[in-house]
Amino acid sequence: MIQVVLIIFSNLLELAGPVAPENGPHSYIGPYTAIGDGTIVEGGEIEGSIVIGECTITCGKKIVDSLIGKGCSILAAKGEKPEGTRLIIGENSVLKI
């Protein structure tokens, strides 16, 4: 991991805080966020969260105060039918939607 002290604007990617800068355009990685190896964040925002690693986040939404386990995918569901929130959550989880 790299400790980024300043906010960096490069190719529309904004980093703030300790992150691994392997992320796509139109993304924001906020402060107090740890991103594990092999994770891709593209077209979304994440702040105050821990992403264990090997994840794909391309949902176009802002994710805050979250713990995301290894190998998870958070994808956009635009145009999919039926509309609704699709969830797979583990034991003893707390979900606020």
Image (tube, rainbow, N blue to C red):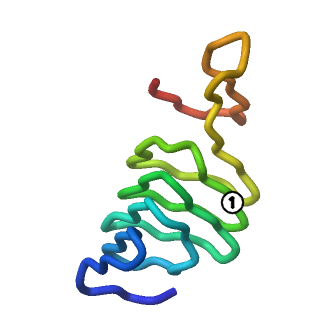
Question: In this view, which residue lies farthest toward the front?
Answer: 11
Tally of numbered tags: 1
Looking at the image, residue 13 sits to the left or right of residue 41; the answer is left
Residue plotted at (66% across, 77% down) = 37
Image coordinates of residue 4 in percent, x first then y, are 34, 86
Residue 71, compared with residue 76, is above or below; it is below
Q: Is 95 on the left-hand or right-hand side of 13?
A: right
Q: On screen, 13 above or below 92?
A: below
For residue 77, above or below residue 7: above
Please state which amino acid type lies under the numbered disc 1. Answer: Cys
- Give the answer, above or below, for where 93 lies relative to 55: above
Percent x, y for residue 2? 45, 89
Give the percent coordinates (x, y) of residue 38.
Answer: 70, 74
Quadrant position of residue 13? bottom left
Q: Residue at x 54, y 67 (%)?
A: 24
Residue 6 is situated, as x and y percent measured from the top left of the image, at 23, 84
Q: Residues within 10 Å of mark 1 (few under 14, many from 20)?
A: many
Locate residue 7 relative to residue 79 in the image: left or right: left
The residue at the far top in this view is 82
Disc 1 designates what residue?
55
Query: In the image, what residue occupies the spot 44% across and 57% down?
Result: 49
Most foreground residue, 34 or 84:
84
Q: Left or right: where does residue 5 sit relative to residue 69?
A: left
SS state under label 1: loop
Please tell me which residue is depicted at 52% across the width and 80% down the height of the picture.
Answer: 20
**Closer to us: 15 or 32:** 15
